[in-house]
Amino acid sequence: MPDKADDVRLVERIAEGDAEALGELYDRYGRVAFGVLYRMLPGPEAAEEVAQDAFHSVWRQARSYRAERGSVRTWLLAICRNAAIDWRRTRGKRTEREVTIDAAAELLSDARVDERVVSAMRAERVRAVVRELPLEQRQVLALAFWGGYSQSEIAARTNTPLGTVKSRVRLAMNKLRERLEDER
Amino acid sequence: MSTERHATEDLPAYALGALGEAERDIVAAHVDRCAQCTRDLAQFEDALYEAAAIGAVQVEPPRDLRTRIVLRHRGARGREGANWAARIAEVLVRPVPLAVPAVLALLLVVSFAIVGTNRQQIDTYERTLAGVAAGRVVALAPTSPNPDARAAVVIPDQGRPYLVVRLPAPPSGKAWEAWVLQPGPKAIPAGTSTSGDVFVLFLTAQLGAGDGVAITLEPVAGSQQPTTQPILLVDRT
């Protein structure tokens, strides 16, 4: 498991123009970043293209990274997710712009987790916390995260009042934060 | 003390990226000037992305993706690029007439106008590399003006290293020549090919630990020293 202070030093080296540090960041998180993109995009070619763009964004934005705004892993994965949403909006064919409710039904997958990123014990704990959320809360998280949909779009797609969607998002996110933050 | 309300209600949806544009801008502006909401947002996002890391598909990225990412940025801020240029300048023992690079560049640009759009060739190249079962794959960096050229040296656990190359067929009377770049610096001829599209070129010279590899355009019989600038290059394998 990468050390958080080491991660920050890597980003500082990237900000100084050290391409090998970018490679080391890839060694730590490239696989999970590719996995996020693979889930959000229509195929491996798109995931590969967006992964290269995302690491280029890391290169360009390294100087603006602020540790108090979250971990390096979170920062990197957020860059990947935003790049994937942009790709779908601007480059994807019409059918690729949308993620079906079924495809994004769950925040988690059953696949074995990459232990270089999250330890098996921690992964099991995260799974348990997510499983404790009611199904409708898990679904709004998944649709927003993997599908890139806003609360209004989710309300329209699932034929649910907007206020209910907002409430589910709030409850689910608060529980994730409370349960996972406590145990860090 | 500020009397501005914290973004408590909308912060979870903001962390999730689920707000509409107008609401998002309001929360972003508040977070920028509020230390407490910055801390809260970091906690929401760290929890969410930890869960997402577990939700990601477990799939192996292409073997040479790391190399391509690193090579794209190596020297981008003016540090290592100078080393490469210096190394190759030392290796080039014969002066090259000024007109030759310009003519070759023109030929290659015309060729790549065709090659660059050929998705089938790209797929063949990537499938070939993806099929490497045991060994290391090190990508060579294309040098301007040939950004679409691709090559990677495959160093199998057993057997001779070889290049997988995606280049157009060389002009008549010319060949692609591979070089092993050794400390010194020395460029050792390592085989030629007159093939085009996607082809494999076994290295005929010993590739030592840390040696570089380059490809240049040479007369069809090959050269003893490079006579043109490299089309593809990696300074260490």
Image (spheres, rainbow, N blue to C red):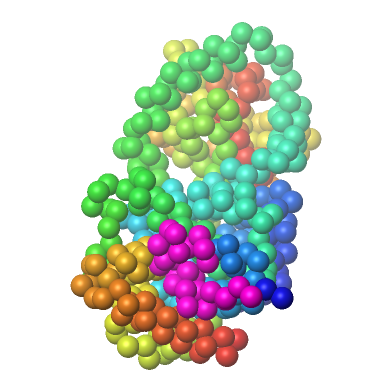
State left or right for residue A16 relative to residue B230: right
Quadrant in which residue B122 is drawn: top left
Residue B101 or residue B203, whichever sits in front: B101
What residue sits 41% from the left and 85% below the top?
A171
Query: Where is residue A149 shown, x and y percent of the image?
Result: 34, 64
What residue sits 35% from the left and 52% below the top?
A88
Region rendered in magenta? B3-27
Total marks in image: 0
Query: Where is residue B117 shown, x and y percent of the image?
Result: 36, 31
Q: Quadrant of the N terminus of chain B?
A: bottom right
Query: Where is residue A177 shown, x and y percent of the image?
Result: 51, 83
Quick one: which residue is furthest to the front in this view?
B3
Q: Residue B136 magenta-drawn?
A: no
Q: Is residue A19 visible?
A: yes
Q: Is B181 drawn above or below residue A33 in the view shown?
A: above
Residue B71 or residue A130, whichever sits in front: A130
Q: Is B154 drawn above or below residue A34 in the view shown?
A: above
Quick one: which residue is furthest to the right in this view?
B184
Quadrant in which residue A156 is drawn: bottom left
Query: Where is residue B13 shown, x and y percent of the image?
Result: 44, 72
Quick one: which residue is furthest to the left in this view?
A159
State left or right for residue A124 relative to residue B123: right
Q: Residue B20 magenta-drawn?
A: yes
Residue A153 or residue A180, whichever sits in front: A153
What residue sits 55% from the left and 25% below the top?
B145
What residue sits 73% from the left and 64% below the top?
A9
Q: Is residue B208 visible?
A: no
